Amino acid sequence: MEYLLSKFLKKEPKKEVTLEDLQAVLLRTQSPIKKFNTTKGDYNEVYPKIYVGDWNTAKNLNLLLSLGITHVVNAAQGVGFGMVDTNEHFYHPVNIRYMGLAVCDDSNVAINEYFESVSNFIDDALLQKGTVLIHCIMGISRSATIAIAYLMIKKKFRAKEALEKVKKARDIRPNDGFLKQLAQLDNDRLQNTFDH
């Protein structure tokens, strides 16, 4: 019935997104040439007023101020290997708002638990004319996943579009578990549009 209705409306039924679809987008989308400067950090603006970067960028307060960063999302909050030990106190002297997510870069981690709350934090920052840095250790998996989820939830991108947008701005490689969760987010959102 849905198929016939979509034909009648001259629209193809929207196809669910798979892990393989998102992997294909990563493979075919060209990233910018990397201009790495160890003293400055490694970051890229992936959407107006949203940067994705590494831990060096996150810890360089002068750099953050020069970029106009008003809000930081640490997608690797914690102490130890693969984590970045910043918190709201670290940014308090420069008046930067902070949100930390204790997420390991592991395909079994449910990063999707944070999608809604972190998207609200980023959206509030942009509504206040702020600029956001989303970071993890290298700025390629956890922070990229958060940026993509934000574009999907608040800017209504489909998963493939959001992934392509971020990949064109920065060399990213979210792990397969995170890609599956982004595909699931896309499919859930697609299902909700059919249900309403």
Image: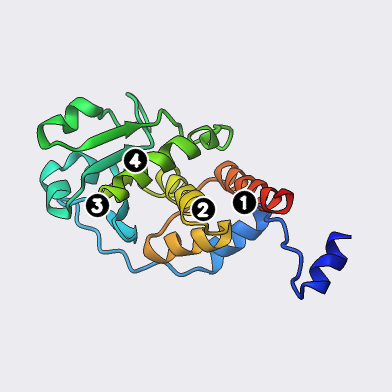
Three-letter amino acid code at the position of disc 4: Ile
Q: CA distance from mark 4 to mark 3?
A: 26 Å
Q: Residue 27, image x and y in percent?
A: 55, 64
Three-letter amino acid code at the position of disc 3: Lys
Q: Which residue is mark 4?
A: 137
Q: Residue 99, image x and y in percent?
A: 32, 33
Residues marked 1 and 2 touching at CB (< 8 Å): yes
Q: CA distance from mark 1 to mark 3?
A: 28 Å
Along the polypeptide, which appears first: circle 4 or circle 3?
A: 3
User: Residue 129, which numbered label?
Assistant: 3
Foreground mark, 1 or 3, reads 3
Three-letter amino acid code at the position of disc 1: Asp
Along the polypeptide, which appears first: circle 1 or circle 4?
A: 4
Q: Is residue 53 visible?
A: no
Q: Secondary structure at mark 1?
A: helix
Q: Which residue is mark 2?
A: 152
Along the polypeptide, which appears first: circle 1 or circle 2?
A: 2
Q: Is residue 17 visible?
A: yes
Along the polypeptide, which appears first: circle 2 or circle 3?
A: 3
Q: Is residue 107 above or below residue 179?
A: above
Q: CA distance from mark 4 to mark 2?
A: 23 Å
Q: Residue 156, image x and y in percent?
A: 52, 57
Residues marked 4 and 2 touching at CB (< 8 Å): no
